[in-house]
Image: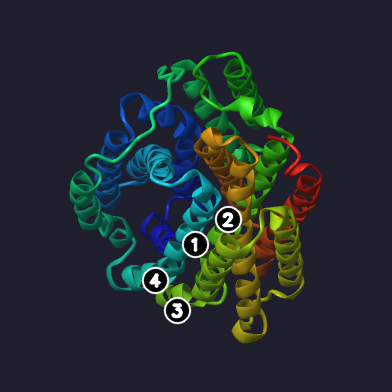
Amino acid sequence: MAFPDLARSFPADRVPDLSWVVSSYAVLFAALLTPVGRLADTFGRVRVFLVSLAVFTAASALCAAAPDLAWLITARAAQGAAAAGMIPAALGLLLAATPPAGLAAAIGTWGAAGSLATAAGPALGGVLVDAFGWRSVFLINVPVGLLLVAAGARGLRGMPERRGAERRLPDPWGTAAFASGIALLVLGLTKGSDWGWTSAGTLGTTAGGLALAAGALRRSSRHPAPAVETGLLRNRTFAVASAAAACTGAALFAWLLSSPLFLTTVWHYSVLKSGFAVTPGALTSAVAAVAVGKRAKPRHLPLVVAVSMASFAAVSGWTYLELGAEPRFLALWLPMGLVGGASFGATLTALSTAAATSLPPHRFASGVGMTTTARQLGGALGVAATGAIIAARTGGGPQAFRDVYLACALLAACAAVVGLAMARTYGKES
């Protein structure tokens, strides 16, 4: 919701460059989930969780104070790195306090909690940006973060941690190569329209990113403390679920970024009105996530992914055909948002639960972490692609955003097909 106001604050920077405010967070978040999870096992999950929360709070303050785009992108990268410490440490604490029989339900509730929080985000973001500008969406994290650090220091004292027997420090070279490779891939996508898609700069950057990422994955397959838990991909169900998560993340991030931009630049909604316009989708996302987390049987999870993503592919295709310059909130935007939100809420919860429960119980946390990594990597590439698609339509207008929704439809269709493939192996491996 802050993105349109951010674009007005930095008018000299184009959408592909501004998209790094999202991409820098996603790249660091994805690349550091596994390594920082290992640090949590080594130094203690409570300690890593609280330190990461404190760093996230400090990085939020730096984002709010950013005098230029480079500062903001750097601070957002620090936020992503801190989030990568918060997520695996918090999930590890949650699973350590949960009886073995309730682990699957706990993971489902964990996924649903994220969607419930998301439901409040668009409206609150719209109110804050409308009243105080984009800096307020970062500044609000500071008092909240300080309160949570203080509460966590008291409430998590003595929490069981279930540290693993092996507590090796994560591979620094593999981690750096993986993060750099993904960053170069995103850079190639975001700058391709400026440099030329067949230019040496674009091709060299993309090829270098692929080589670094592939090298990091190869190194991870042989390293005792890998940057990426590639060993989990030997489980076919988990590998398929991770592929679905990557496609889903790309579609989700593209949808989330393009929607408020379209509402403010084409339909000329205010930021506040845009926030409330996307809230119905966030609400259905929360409802669907809670329903899947609490009620869906494990054997139904692949079908949930397939049906949900097929529904989003259909509604995105419809949006591609019908979207225009004339506002049509009730006839087009509201049903698209309701279906899209429910589709993503159901899919993300189903994927997290299916991916984790396809593994032995002691690998549940690693499974959720790897699935989140796949989703964030897809999201980073989805954001980059969104910026590239919008930049390619120099005249702007509805057609640029229609192209984004077409890309979302294709990505969602891929996720639906992969979800059907997951049904063949789910429950047949351990």
- What kind of element bears circle 3? helix
Mark 3 or mark 2, whichever is nearer to me = 2
Q: Which mark is residue 273?
A: 3
Residue that label 1 marks: 115
Q: Amino acid at mark 2?
A: Thr
Residue at position x 34%, y 61% from top? 134
Mark 1 → mark 4, Cα distance in angstroms: 18 Å
Q: Is residue 409 above or below residue 380?
A: below
Q: Earlier in the sequence, mark 2 or mark 1?
A: 1
Q: Amino acid at mark 3?
A: Lys
Residue at position x 47%, y 54% from top? 110
- Return the x and y of residue 242 as percentages of the image width and height: 65, 41
Q: Amino acid at mark 4?
A: Gly
Rendering quarter of residue 97: top left
- Return the x and y of residue 173 as percentages of the image width and height: 48, 16
Q: Are marks 4 and 3 in contact (CB under 8 Å)?
A: yes
Q: Earlier in the sequence, mark 2 or mark 4?
A: 4
Q: Quadrant of the N terminus?
A: bottom left
Whether residue 224 is visible to the viewer of this picture, yes or no, is yes
Q: Are marks 1 and 4 in contact (CB under 8 Å)?
A: no
Mark 3 → mark 1, Cα distance in angstroms: 21 Å
Q: Which mark is residue 349?
A: 2
Q: Label 2: few (<14), some or many (≥20) within 10 Å?
A: many
Q: Are marks 3 and 2 in contact (CB under 8 Å)?
A: no
Q: Earlier in the sequence, mark 3 or mark 1?
A: 1
Q: Are marks 2 and 1 in contact (CB under 8 Å)?
A: yes
- What kind of element bears circle 1? helix
